[in-house]
Amino acid sequence: MTSNLIPEYAYTVVYVKDVAKSVAFYSKAFGYHVRRLDESNRWGELESGPTTIAFTPIHQRETDDRSGAVQTPLSDRERPPMEVCFSYTDVDAAYKRAVENGATPVSEPEDKEWGQRVGYVRDVDGIVVRMGSHVAKPAKQD
């Protein structure tokens, strides 16, 4: 029996200081096309495949009054309880483009023991962005 309660992952909403600035930054730094930026600059979306990356202001009545205020890190030694992760074929080139377009370097790309190449930057709001390759498939064992 098929259930109609199986969800489709639709959005990741990132709360930011300036929606238009963040949308422009993600477009330039990570290569996404802007799907939508409303005239009020209170909602923006990027073309990102089956799941949408959306941006909205940190403080707004609709969310602060209903579900609580967004908590932001107090310093660069703290970070939000989430990170945005993007996969690239060429992590080094993607990392370089991000930094050249305003991302703050955190950790240059390096090969990980699990077969992935990973680098980290911070966006214009201090959110950590992980840039990694797809994990390499294990070698066939005879």
Image (cartoon, rainbow, N blue to C red):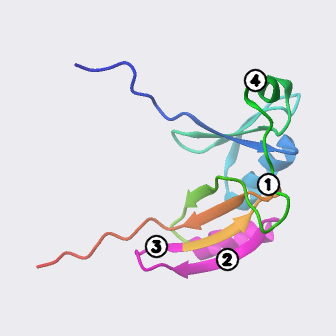
Q: Closer to the N terminus: mark 3 or mark 4?
A: 4
The residue identified by callout 4 is 66
Q: Amino acid at mark 2?
A: Ser
Q: Closer to the N terminus: mark 3 or mark 2?
A: 2
The residue identified by callout 3 is 116
Q: Amino acid at mark 1?
A: Phe
Q: Closer to the N terminus: mark 2 or mark 1?
A: 1
Question: What is the spatial separation of the Cα atoms under label 3 and label 2, in whole angstroms?
Answer: 14 Å
135 on left or right of 34: left
Give the magenta-colored segment's residue range: 91-117
Q: Amino acid at mark 3?
A: Gln
Q: Closer to the N terminus: mark 1 or mark 3?
A: 1
Q: Magenta stretch containing residue 29, yes or no? A: no
Q: Is residue 114 above or below residue 67?
A: below
Question: What is the spatial separation of the Cα atoms under label 2 and label 4, in whole angstroms?
Answer: 37 Å
Instruction: Residue 81 in the image: state x and y as whole percent.
Output: 66, 53
